[in-house]
Image (cartoon, rainbow, N blue to C red):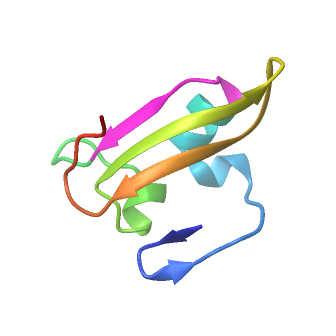
Amino acid sequence: VWGGGADFAGSMDIEDLGTLGWKVLEGGQVYRYQRSARRTDRFFDNLGLASVLCLPLEIEGRILGGIFFGHRGLHRFT
């Protein structure tokens, strides 16, 4: 995975992933993020991403992980 000018790989504690971890990986929900003056996400802000779409990867009712698409500027995913 690449983001914010740095590569990272490996596993992370779910607590480190913030809303991404809880909503997508634990709850199986789609998560959309747009940075604003009132809304920030520590994980994505640290990656330099202003817009993010996160989807759970689910097989046979079991969430195996998640995939996210990010953009450094404000962006609407379609």
The residue most toward the front is: 78
Left or right, 56 with respect to 52, comes to right
Looking at the picture, how far across and down is residue 24, in whole percent?
Answer: 60, 33
The residue most toward the top is: 61
**Residue name at image x 73 percent, y 59 percent:** 12
- Quadrant housing the C terminus: top left
For residue 29: magenta?
A: yes
16 lies above or below 59: below
Left or right, 11 with respect to 15, comes to right
- Quadrant housing the N terminus: bottom right
Quadrant housing residue 58? top right
Left or right, 77 with respect to 26, comes to left
Q: How many marks?
A: 0
Looking at the picture, how far across and down is residue 76, in whole percent?
Answer: 23, 40
Looking at the picture, how far across and down is residue 7, in whole percent?
Answer: 58, 79
Q: Which residues are magenta?
A: 26-34
Looking at the picture, how far across and down is residue 19, in whole percent?
Answer: 52, 39
39 lies above or below 47: above
**Residue name at image x 63 percent, y 75 percent:** 8
Left or right, 52 with respect to 68, comes to left
28 lies above or below 57: above
**Residue name at image x 55 percent, y 35 percent:** 55
Quadrant housing residue 29? top right
The residue most toward the left is: 37
For residue 41: magenta?
A: no
